[in-house]
Amino acid sequence: MVIAKIKRNAYLSVALCVLAVIWIYHFLSIYHQPTLLQAPKTIPYTVPYADGSRDQFHDLSHLVKYELSPSFGYSRRIIKTRPFFGAREELTILNDTKLFDEMQMLSAEPEDLQNVALKSTLPPLTLSVPTSPKVDTSIFAFGISTNVDRLPDAVPQLQHWLPNTKSTLHILVPPSSKIQQSQQQMRELGIKTTIKSTNLAFAKAYFALIKELYDTRTPQTKWLVLIDDDTFVPSLPALIAHLNKLYDASDELVIGAMSDNIQQMKNFGLIPFGGGGIFISVPLAAKLTDPRVWKACMELPNDQGDQIVNECLRAHSTIRTTYDLNLHQMDFHGDASVLDGYYESGRQMLTVHHWRSWYNVDMPALAYVSKACGDEGILMRWLFADDIVLSNGYSVVEYPNGIEIAELAKVEHTWNEPPDLALHRIGPIRERMGKGDKSTYRMLDTEILEGYGVRQTYVRRVERLEKGKDEKGRLRMEAVGEDGVVELIWVF
C-alpha cells in the first residue's frame, strides 16, 4: 500500500513537471519569438591616451578575431568628410596625398594588442564626398517574391536603404504562421511593409507582384519595382534621381538590367534580369493588368518570373525593355575576390545582386561607412600617393610597379569566365594583374565606434601553409611572411 502510494505520487510529480515544461515552452514560443530586428553593430569607443610623448596608446584587441600572422604590419588614418554638391566621380586623384603612414610591426598575441603605442606623423585626412540628391521616395513601390524563412537574411541589406523612407515594400510569400509577426517586425524597423500569402509558384508570384503593386499604388507612385531579396541598393536617393533624370514615368516604360554574362543571355534570352531590378511605369502596368492581358500572361509556362515579364511584353505590348547600365545583375560565380575588378572600378552601382549567393561580399558591412560619409561615398574611389587606391568599403590596393590612370578607367578581369563574355556590358576590360603588380587589403569588417565614427578594417593576408594538426585534429596553418592591416576611422 505505502509503496503503491509512493509510486503514484512519483508519477504525479513527473506528470506535473512535464506539464510545467510544456507550459513554459508554450509561453516562450508566444512571447519570445525569433525577431527580425537587428541590433546595430556598435561598440563602445575608448579614447586613446598619451604618455607625454608623441605616441598614443590604443586598444587593438578587436584584431584578435582576424587570426593574423604572429607579427603583422599595422597603420591607421583618421578621415573627415567634406560634403559638396556635385557629381560623383569614378576616380578622384590625390597624387600628393598619402592615405596611410608607414607600417608599424605589431605582435598578434592578445595581451600585446591591449595597449599599443601607435606612432603617427599624418594629420586627419579630409575627403570630399557628394551629398545625396533630395528626392521624393514615395514614387517607388517595391515588390519581392520570397518566403518568410529567407526574410532574416534579407533584412540587414534592406535596413541600409529602405527604413524611414516613403517607399513601400510588398512581399508575397507562401502561406506561413509567421507572416503577421514578420510584417510587424519589419514595420518596427521603419520599413513600410505589407506581407501577403500566395499559393502561386515562385515565378508566377513574382509576376503577380505587378498587379499587387498596381492595385495598392498611391497617387504619388510612379514606378513599380520588382527586386529579389538579395538586391542591394547603395543609395536610394541616387537611384531615384537617376530615373528622374533619364526617363519620363508618364510614358509606358520598363527599365531593367542586362546580364553582364553573355552566357546567361544565351540561356535566357534578351530579358530584363530581375536581380538588378525591373522598373515598370504605372501607365505600362495599367496595360499589363487589363483582365484579358493579365489572364493570358498568368498562363504563360515560363518558370522564371523575369521571363514571364518579358514574354508578356512581347505578346501584348509594343514596349520593350530599356537596359540601364547602372543596374547590376552580377551573374558571376566564385569566391570573395571574383568580382574585385567590378567593385574596384569606381563606377556607380545603383543596384547590386548575387552578393550573398553566387559570390560573397558583405554589402551591409561594406555600406556601413555611409553613416559617416553618406551613401554617395560607398565604393567611391580615390588614387593616393605611391599608387594606392581606396575603393571605399571594399579594398585598399597598392600597385608596387605603378599603374596608369588610363588603366584605372578599365575594369580588371578578376572573374573566372573569359573576359569577352562581359565586354558587351562592362568593357573596357584590362587583364588580371599578377601578385607582384597588385597587393590588396580587403575589407573584413566595419564597426561603429559609439559617438565617434566608423572603423573599417582592411587586411592583406600572406599565404598560409599546412603544418600538421592541432590536439583537436584541426589543420594548423602557418603564415608565410607577415599580414598587413590598414584601419580607416571615418569620424562623424
Image: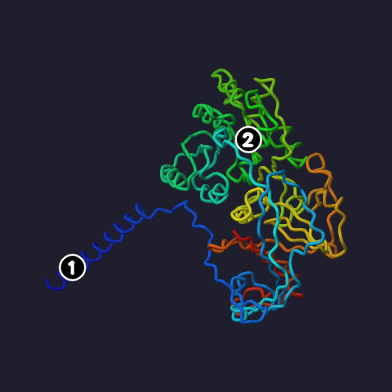
Residue type of the residue flagged with mark 1: Asn
Badge 2 marks a residue whose secondary structure is: loop
Q: Percent position (x, y) of residue 120?
A: 70, 73
Q: In this picture, is 411 found above or below 134? A: below
Check disc 2 and report the residue beneath it. 304
Q: Residues within 10 Å of mark 1 (few under 14, many from 20)?
A: few
Q: Secondary structure at mark 1?
A: helix
x%, y% of residue 42? Answer: 53, 61
Q: Residue shown at 63%/54% (left/top)?
A: 373
Amino acid of disc 2: Gln
**Disc 1: which residue:** 9
For the N terminus, give its image quadrant: bottom left
Hey, which quadrant is residue 145 in on the image?
A: top right
Quarter of the figure with residue 109: bottom right
Q: Earlier in the sequence, mark 1 or mark 2?
A: 1
Disc 1 vs disc 2: which is toward the camera?
2
